[in-house]
Image: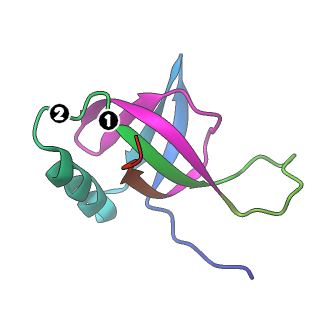
Amino acid sequence: MHLSLEPIGIITKVANKSEILIYSDFEQVIRNIMSKIGDGAEKGQKLLVVHKNNNQKQMDGHQVQVTKATLLERNGNLLTISKIEANEDSVIDVRLDLTA
């Protein structure tokens, strides 16, 4: 089954970390996360990032990938996270990892 998913942001690699830019139309995603963890407590939170896998070598046919990451910093709708194996991937969703 193929689904058409609208991206809410994009992942980019920056030095030894990654950044997720959430598009302004989807800032509610960030507000939902911040309401669950409280002000000033975002550093070190574990996140699950659902993103389209733009790796052309991927042969298993999966359209999306779920990656665990640690939130290092938030500046508005820009999330700085631990380095993940994704670059220029479209972000589908960002959630708190409640199993951590």
What is the secondary structure assignment of the residue under circle 2?
A: loop
Determine if the magenta segment contains residue 30. no
Residue at which label 2 appears: 41
Residue at which label 1 appears: 45
Residue drawn where x is 83% and y is 63% of the image: 61
Expressed as whole percent of the image width and height from the top left, the position of residue 85 reads: 65, 34
Residue drawn where x is 38% and y is 38% of the image: 46
Expressed as whole percent of the image width and height from the top left, the position of residue 86 reads: 63, 39
Residue drawn where x is 86% and y is 58% of the image: 60
State the CA–CA distance, disc 1 to disc 2: 8 Å
Q: Amino acid at mark 2?
A: Ala
| Image colouring | rainbow
Q: Residue furthest left?
A: 39
Q: Bounds of the magenta span?
A: 65-92
Expressed as whole percent of the image width and height from the top left, the position of residue 9 reads: 45, 54
For this view, does 94 lie left or right of residue 15? left
Packing grade of label 1 (10 A; few <14, some 14-19, many >=20) is some
Q: Quadrant of the C terminus?
A: top left
Q: What label does residue 26 carry, if any?
A: none
